[in-house]
Image (tube, rainbow, N blue to C red):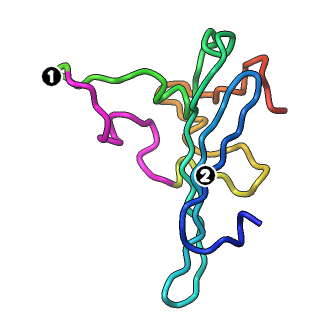
Amino acid sequence: DLFQQPGDWSTIHISTPFVSFHVEYRLNQSENGCLSHSIDAWISHTSSEMKGQVWQGILGETREPKYNSEGKQEISDRQFLLSGPRDNDYEVSGPHDTAFPARWSTGSGLRGIWQKSKFSLK
């Protein structure tokens, strides 16, 4: 069971006809026995059809490189790259929830990549 493994990172590859993901997972245990989970995930491949779609929401925020006023690509300034200033702006309430504050941000009209796509997860 992936969620029972202690310590090191586990790598998971998820592939569909439209998009592939690379996921890194780790179960963390603090000195007082408290368990937490670390998950890093990114898109590793998209189909031509998917690339032709308008991307919005979390994925749309980071799809294309962003450049600062000096013309250098910005890769670490969260305030510059993302509409949500806090981690919890991107958190959902449960495993099947899809609502989170940054998804509905009015600053850039973010609506979520799956909201209006024919690849809807509904």
Query: For this view, does 85 lie left or right of residue 18?
Result: left
Question: Which numbered disc covers residue 70?
Answer: 1
Where does the N terminus fall, quadrant-wise?
bottom right
Q: Residue shown at 60%/25% (left/top)?
A: 45
How dense is the environment of label 1, judged by Cα within 10 Å: few (below 14), some, or many (20 and up)? Answer: few
Residue 70 lies, with reference to residue 53, above or below; the image says below
| Residue 37, image x, y percentages | 59, 66
Query: For this view, does 30 lie left or right of residue 48?
Result: left
Tell which residue pokes out farthest to the left in this image.
Answer: 70
Q: Residue shown at 58%/33% (left/top)?
A: 43
Q: What stretch is highlighted in magenta?
A: 72-87
In the image, is residue 54 part of the stretch drawn in magenta?
no
Give the SS element for disc 1.
loop
Give the SS element for disc 2.
strand
Residue 83 lies, with reference to residue 52, above or below; the image says below
| Residue 11, image x, y percentages | 60, 52
Front of the two marks 1 and 2: 2
| Residue 7, image x, y percentages | 55, 72
The residue identified by callout 2 is 11
Q: Residue shown at 46%/42% (left/top)?
A: 84
| Displayed quadrant of residue 83 | top left
| Residue 109, image x, y percentages | 54, 25
Between 25 and 54, the residue placed more toward the observer is 25
Q: How far apart are marks 1 and 2 (CA)?
A: 37 Å
Tell which residue pokes out farthest to the bottom in this image.
Answer: 32
Question: Which numbered disc covers residue 33?
Answer: none
In the image, is residue 85 part of the stretch drawn in magenta?
yes
